[in-house]
Amino acid sequence: MRIRPLKAAAHALAAVALAALGTTSLAAATAEAQPAPDAAHYGVKPLAHRTGQLAPAAASADTLQVGSSASQGVVSPNPKVYLVFWGSQWSSDPAGVATDMQSLFKGLYGGKDTWGTILDQYCEGVAKGTVTCGTKGIHVNHPSSSPLGGVWFDKSAAAPGSATAAQIASEAGKAAAHFGNTTQAPNLNAQYVVLSPTGTHPDGFPNSGFCAWHDYTTTAYGKLAYTNLPYIPDSGAGACTTFTDGRLLSGIESTETHEYAETVTDFWPSIGWNGGGGEIGDACVQLDAYVPLSTGTFDLQGLWSNSADKCVTHG
């Protein structure tokens, strides 16, 4: 996994190297997850305004390779996204994040979505070091219907003002129970996006050097892929995106599509697809595009394509 940075920080620098994968565990369904001592999260992107211009491509230096021959946990063949709006504070949503995130995933499928087809070339169940799947292995399938598996406003209590990584992982475990995903089978495709409310600072955001990150946790329901997604509009327009046009939701859209794609292609980090520039989104943080979907137009971050040998915004 890689952290998506807001600014240079020790946390981000540790993630730039492909660190040993860290796991967390839940002793029981509702027990709090505890990260391994050397845990490093994944998915890095800077906070500051960007030029909107893609830096010269390193081309083959950024080619992604599969990190394991495993047939589970490398990719998510049939992605399902569960949006978890954590905390009673979601009675306030000044930027309209909840509606926006639901609209994004309701439209991220089918022929209208050419961005998501970038992911189809990646697979699992092939030899470690593979760079081209061809017809081999189990490929990521482009969704024929919305990948949004469920939405939960968990208002049972206030979300912590400064949630730890362990608390975020624990919330993902609670979400799996809420959605009835209580065995490993459904969790081979489920990713739990834990969205913290406005005014909170999950894992030190925005001073920990990231826009968001993804990871996995080991629970009574098997391994769960999850994302720590802060309330990025709190940082203002232009945060976590290349665009400087003042659109407040661009940063969280760009960030979440970065994390979504990285989770799909490196499901249980870091046995999935990585390269010289990191995961599928890491090499392409300088590229954003406004992409029309059936549910609106969204800021989708560019992704690395092995077949094109560059960052692209459509398959």
Image (cartoon, rainbow, N blue to C red):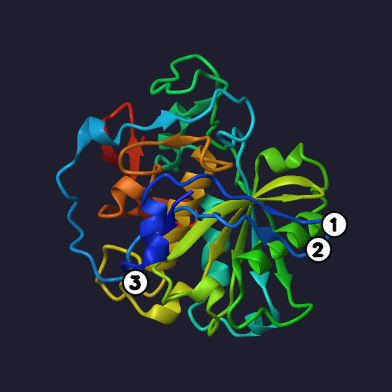
Measured from the top left, where is residue 188 in percent x and y?
Answer: 68, 38
What kind of residue is marked 3?
Answer: Ala
What kind of residue is marked 2?
Answer: Ala
Q: Secondary structure at mark 1?
A: loop
Quadrant of the image occupied by residue 167 = bottom right
Q: Earlier in the sequence, mark 3 or mark 1?
A: 1
- CB atoms of marks 3 and 1 within 8 Å: no
Q: Residue furthest top?
A: 135
Task: Please name the residue that numbered disc 2 is placed on.
Answer: 31
- CB atoms of marks 1 and 2 within 8 Å: yes
Q: Earlier in the sequence, mark 2 or mark 3?
A: 2
Vertical side of 9 occupied by 293: above or below: above
Q: CA distance from mark 3 to mark 1?
A: 37 Å
Measured from the top left, where is residue 89 in percent x and y?
Answer: 65, 84
Vertical side of 122 occupied by 112: above or below: below
> Residue at horizontal 29%, vertical 36%?
62
Mark 2, Cα crowd under 10 Å, few <14 / some 14-19 / many 20+, is some
Q: Nearer the viewer, residue 17 or 221?
A: 17
Q: Secondary structure at mark 2?
A: loop
What kind of residue is marked 1?
Answer: Ala
Quadrant of the image occupied by residue 250 = bottom left
Task: Please name the residue that numbered disc 1 is placed on.
Answer: 28
- 189 horizontally vs 290: left or right: right
Indicate which label's residue lies in the foreground, 2 or 3.
2
Task: Please name the residue that numbered disc 3 is placed on.
Answer: 239
Q: Residue furthest front?
A: 37
